Amino acid sequence: MELRLLIIDPQNDFCKKEGTLFVPGADEDMIRLSKMVNRLKSKISDIHVTLDSHHYVDIAHPVFWVDSSGKHPQPLTTIISVDDVENGTWRTTNPQLQKRALEYVKALRDNDRYSLVIWPYHCLIGSWGYGIHSELFEALLNWEKDFCMVDYVTKGSNLYTEHYSAVQADVPDPQDPGTMLNTKLIETLEEADIIALAGEALNFCLANTVTDIANHFGEDNIKKFVLLEDATSPVPGQDFEPLTQNFLKKMKARGMQVSTTDKFLT
């Protein structure tokens, strides 16, 4: 049996209370996941870990935008629409990027992705917040002791586009291959018999990654997905809750299974 584990963004900024974008429940998620990795150590064929990898200047960070008073937007409470950019409610801090930013929010609207949410500065490359949750990291190292190798997949370093999904940016940049469809990861997962899914956050990066893989996978392969529901948590908030329910409803209807870390493969 070919068992592959896909862990989405198990990083300190999401998983620790001191993190800049802490997802409630994520710390416990990673502790439970760590125990499962250790329990199933010899049965796991591959582990793929995605890493949100941002620069300080990023189109979804406050520094990128200013209002008419020159103030940067408040993270988590600011959503920037096409109208906001066209009418000057929000403009780019660097005027030279205004045209590109307007094209970007239009592309988000036209391809039916998320609206542009402004997030706290998070997962800055090289920072403490960028690191992997300590207990999970120990479990990954323990798995590697048998001369296995975790596949670390970085995403998000292009400052002009969001990269919720691990397999493609929300608006791919033709000049940056790292934002285009990651066919290698999709084809690797396609070889599995079972694909266990975990990580943060359920209603953003995990949901987008799984959906994008499913859309390039073939419907029969979606039945290989097993969401570990006690190893993932959503970003809370009234605006974000429907995203969780929509993702779960759609993917379960397409064949995704659900389990928990303690019951999976017992």
Image (spheres, rainbow, N blue to C red):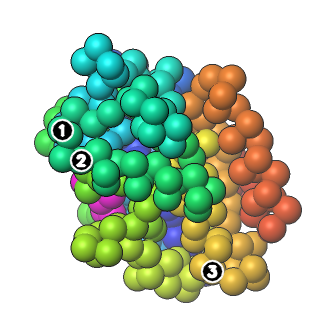
Query: Crowdedness of circle 1 by 10 Å Cα count: few (<14), some, many (20+)?
Result: few
Relative horizontal placement of residue 123, taking residue 217 as reference (left or right):
left
Q: What element carries label 1?
A: loop
Three-letter amino acid code of the residue under disc 3: Phe
Q: Where is residue 173 in the image (x, y as percent from the top left)?
A: 33, 68
Q: How many labels does the image show?
A: 3
Cα–Cα span, label 1 and label 2? 6 Å
Residue tagged by mark 1? Answer: 94
Residue tagged by mark 2? Answer: 97
Relative horizontal placement of residue 127, taking residue 189 as reference (left or right):
left
Q: Residue at x 51, y 43 (%)?
A: 82
Where does the magenta region start and end? 152-157
- 40 in relation to 60, above or below: below
Q: Which residue is drawn at 20% across and 40% down?
A: 95
- 264 in relation to 122, above or below: below
Quadrant location of the C terminus?
A: bottom right
Report if residue 155 lies within the magenta region: yes
Closer to the camera, 76 or 5? Answer: 76
Question: Mark 1 or 3 closer to N-term?
Answer: 1
- 50 in relation to 20, above or below: below
Cα–Cα span, label 3 and label 2? 36 Å
Cα–Cα span, label 1 and label 3? 40 Å
Residue tagged by mark 3? Answer: 217
